[in-house]
Image: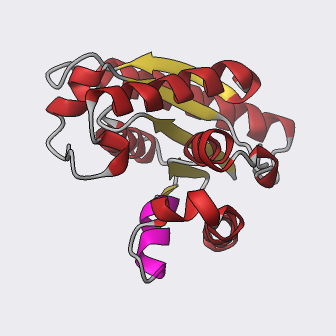
Amino acid sequence: MLEYAIDGVDGSAKTPIITGVKERLEARRIKVDVHSPFLEANQLIPEKEIYGYWESRAPEAVKILHEIIEKARRNSEADVLLFDRHWMTIMGELKYRSHQPYLWRDFIPTFYIDAPVSKTIDCSRYSPEVPWTSSAAKIEEYRTRYRELSDEYRHFIRAKYLVTSRDMPLESIIHAMSCTISDDLHSARERRPWILVRR
């Protein structure tokens, strides 16, 4: 099984891109599982939002997310496992808020999606009530975090994309990601045809 994350700033069209990639790969008879560790974590904790953990309970947040990701791996029988957010979002909090980046050691190939502040604000799910999108300055702060992480951990970045507006067609991004994953899967099968290898 191959694993990938699709990660980046809020409002960068990650969800429709993941949906499109899944549909494109499944049309090629490639089995795909999609997991959203942060949303799944929010469903498990009393506070219903793991964001508040990063300031003083970072090890607990890491443990919860690690267990969710490992469970997804154990239970998946797919050819490809896609994560809607993974290490970039986690490191964005560990490095810049709790200052404990050493707590996370699980890195997988990642497609990083950037978007300008205007795109985040224009997203249908945008809310100034949540801390990470409470102002244009805060959105830009998170955007800077992602860009710095994509440079620092560039060997885990499979590709970078920029979604500039709500009306921007996503087909070219979906096509490029799907082809990359399909090619990787073919190469993995060529190397070890009796199994699929992770990472």
Residue nearer the viewer, 178 or 35: 35
Residue drawn at x 52%, y 61% as measured from the top left? 37
Residue 77 in view in this figure:
no
Residue drawn at x 21%, y 22% as measured from the top left? 118
Residue farthest toward the front in the current orientation of the protein:
56
Residue nearer the viewer, 80 or 83: 83
Query: In this image, 172 relative to 42: left or right?
Result: left
Query: In this image, 192 relative to 94: left or right?
Result: right
Quadrant of the rendered structure where residue 88 is? top right
Q: Position of residue 18 (x, y in %)?
A: 39, 42
Q: Position of residue 129 (x, y in %)?
A: 22, 52
Residue 101 in view in this figure:
yes
Quadrant of the rendered structure where residue 149 is? top right
Name the dominant secondary structure of the magenta segment. Answer: helix
Q: Position of residue 17 (x, y in %)?
A: 35, 36
Query: In this image, 189 relative to 109: left or right?
Result: right
Magenta segment boundaries in residue numbering: 37-45
Query: In this image, 142 relative to 169: left or right?
Result: right
Residue farthest toward the right in the current orientation of the protein:
192
Residue nearer the viewer, 57 or 75: 57
Residue nearer the viewer, 143 or 171: 143
Residue drawn at x 76%, y 49% as measured from the top left? 198
Q: Is 38 inside the magenta-drawn segment?
A: yes
Give the number of marks: 0
How is colour applied across the structure in the image? secondary structure
Quadrant of the frame with the C terminus: top right
Q: Position of residue 72 (x, y in %)?
A: 61, 67
Residue drawn at x 27%, y 27% as measured from the top left? 136
